[in-house]
Image: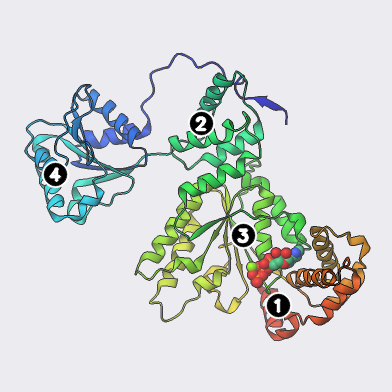
């Protein structure tokens, strides 16, 4: 696609039209007008919240006071009111309680103080008297849960995040900033620009602006190279305590030997996932479950989906999910899923899903509830997240998970046949800068009957070490020797593999 010029493609801004009331403003306004005594605004954008409320208050001629623990209470809708009083929470609550004027009282970051019964009682007193007095207390924090005593007097809203159109506007503003200071246009192409907009959804306005600067200010261009950096920075902003990890290492379909049906299946669906193709009656793909023996390339396939579709890969660690505190496990899962949603479009990879979901007697139903949470999310989610779950122990897979309709498809990855083994040798030799034509691939493929992809790779690695120890380049004999030395898992665990195959034949689609 032709590069286009972001700065020149941007028409000069028209004289600022009166900004239409945003839906956030509308929502907060509605709560104030309907006389909800306590309004909780959960947001990381305190400045914007204050602006919204001050604008609203002007319409209704109410004074606006802001309290913070650092600056105390001061009026913010008029200039020149700098009195810093009542820093102590009790003092400010007492002041509001006794005040004779109606006003909007904003308490910023009061959430740690809601642990004290006295503070809670004050707020309740204020709420109870509110009807007579007509004022509103707004609690602004990044996160705030009203104590049970106050819940019936309060309503909580979270600010809406900027939509695609707004994100585009912000990026263009940043481009103009760069343009002004460097007298040069910001270069990009439509596809990369679209991807950047995609990648910045789920963030607040200041965050979008910061990331747009990250992408533009290094070289005055938005290029595909900026995207991974933006995604990593975004992930750090959102990251949820170790349960979800950002996988830097992805792969391409070309790194996988075999799995031709799986690749074709994914290739057909890529455009629908990205929303480039939209056909009535075709839903975007939602996810696959990959079953197979150890080392058959399940994890590799998950990485290749993300790499080939050029979206971030997030790995959900079911082990880290389980927390000793009762009830935290599902909360952890919900939080991780919310983070993934904010990173969409992305691939969410749940490796060895059976380990986190197998239902045992001891855990008093936790894994059952985790399964329920996951299934509900899978059924209801609307964002473009492609789920790749892998498993190799079918005995431990809950039946609900493999029921028709949960995943788009369940693929079984069998041990590679001779032709595929040849490809795998070729791929891994090339990866190590060895010329595959110098090796008799047919002999290697024949000798490695029953080997998994991982075992083939291991044999190559060991062969390289052996040759290196002798101070020479690796040759065919090194690899054949390693193969002869290895007892593949399919032999060691013959019965288990046979059982898995028989089980899969009835319930899954072959990946090859
Ligand atoms: N089909 C394949 N093509 C190319 N390389 C492969 C293939 N299968 C496995 N490998 C190699 O083996 C490595 C290990 O495989 P991978 O971790 O994907 O297997 P797995 O099925 O996830 O195994 P496990 O059940 O132990 O988690 C891969 O990183 C890759 O280098
Ligand atoms: Mg794996």
Residue 467, percent across and down? 85, 70
Q: Which of these two is toward me, 62 or 458?
A: 458
Mark 4 and mark 1 lie on one chain; the one further toward the N terminus is 4
Q: Which of these two is toward me, 268 or 204?
A: 204
CA distance separating discs 1 and 2: 50 Å
Give the color scheme: rainbow, by chain, secondary structure or one colour. Answer: rainbow
Mark 2, other Cα within 10 Å: few <14 / some 14–19 / many ≥20: few
CA distance separating discs 2 and 4: 39 Å
Query: Does 200 sit above or below residue 147?
Result: above
Mark 3 and mark 2 lie on one chain; the one further toward the N terminus is 2
- For residue 408, the mark is 3
3 vs 2, front mark = 2
Question: Which residue lies under the disc numbered 4?
Answer: 127
Residue 328, percent across and down? 37, 65
Mark 1, other Cα within 10 Å: few <14 / some 14–19 / many ≥20: some
For residue 332, side relative to residue 267 (left or right)? left
Q: Does label 1 point to a residue whose CB lies under 8 Å from ligand 1?
A: no
CA distance separating discs 4 and 1: 65 Å
Please tell me which residue is depicted at 18% across the width and 27% down the height of the picture: 62
Q: Mark 3: which secondary structure?
A: loop
- For residue 501, the mark is 1
């Amino acid at each position: 696609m032709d590069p286009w010029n972001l700065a020149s493609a941007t028409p000069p801004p028209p004289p600022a039209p009166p900004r239409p009331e945003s839906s956030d403003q509308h929502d907060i306004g509605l709560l104030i007008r309907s006389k909800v005594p306590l309004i909780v605004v959960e947001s990381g954008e305190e400045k914007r919240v204050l602006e919204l409320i001050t604008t609203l208050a002007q319409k209704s001629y109410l004074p606006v006071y802001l309290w913070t623990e650092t600056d105390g209470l001061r009026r913010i809708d008029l200039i020149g009111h700098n009195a810093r009083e009542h820093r102590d929470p009790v003092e400010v609550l007492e002041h509001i309680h006794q005040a004779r004027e109606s006003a909007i009282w904003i308490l910023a970051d009061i959430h740690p103080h809601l642990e004290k019964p006295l503070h809670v009682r004050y707020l309740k007193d204020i709420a109870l008297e509110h009807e007579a007095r007509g004022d509103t207390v707004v609690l602004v924090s990044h996160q705030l849960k009203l104590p049970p005593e106050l819940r019936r007097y309060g309503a909580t809203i979270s600010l809406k995040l900027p939509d695609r159109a707004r994100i585009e506007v912000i990026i263009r503003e940043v481009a103009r900033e760069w343009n002004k200071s460097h007298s040069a246009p910001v270069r990009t192409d439509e596809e990369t620009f679209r991807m950047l907009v995609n990648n910045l959804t789920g963030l607040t306005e200041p965050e979008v602006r910061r990331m747009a600067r990250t992408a533009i200010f290094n070289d005055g261009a938005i290029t595909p190279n900026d995207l991974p950096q933006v995604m990593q920075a975004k992930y750090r902003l959102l990251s949820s305590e170790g349960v979800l990890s950002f996988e830097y290492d992805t792969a391409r379909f070309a790194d996988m030997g075999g799995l031709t049906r799986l690749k074709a299946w994914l290739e057909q669906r890529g455009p629908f996932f990205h929303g480039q193709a939209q056909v009535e009656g075709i839903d975007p793909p939602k996810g696959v479950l990959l079953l197979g023996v150890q080392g058959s390339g399940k994890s590799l396939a998950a990485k290749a989906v993300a790499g080939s579709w050029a979206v971030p890969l997030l790995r959900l660690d079911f082990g880290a999910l389980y927390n000793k505190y009762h009830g935290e496990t599902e909360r952890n899962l919900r939080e991780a899923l919310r983070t993934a949603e904010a990173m969409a479009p992305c691939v969410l990879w749940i490796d060895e899903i059976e380990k986190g979901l197998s239902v045992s007697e001891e855990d008093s139903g936790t894994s059952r509830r985790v399964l329920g949470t996951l299934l509900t999310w899978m059924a209801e989610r609307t964002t473009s997240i492609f789920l790749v779950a892998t498993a190799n122990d079918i005995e431990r897979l809950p039946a609900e998970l493999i029921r028709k309709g949960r995943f788009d498809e369940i693929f079984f990855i069998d041990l590679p046949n001779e032709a595929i083994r040849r490809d795998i040798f070729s791929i891994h030799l090339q990866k190590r800068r060895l010329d595959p034509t110098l090796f008799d691939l047919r002999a290697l493929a024949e000798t490695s009957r029953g080997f998994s992809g991982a075992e083939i790779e291991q044999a190559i690695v060991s062969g390289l070490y052996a040759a290196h120890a002798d101070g020479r380049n690796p040759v065919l004999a090194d690899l054949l020797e390693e193969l002869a030395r290895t007892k593949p898992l399919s032999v060691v665990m013959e019965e288990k593999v046979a059982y898995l195959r028989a089980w899969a034949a009835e319930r899954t689609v072959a990946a090859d």
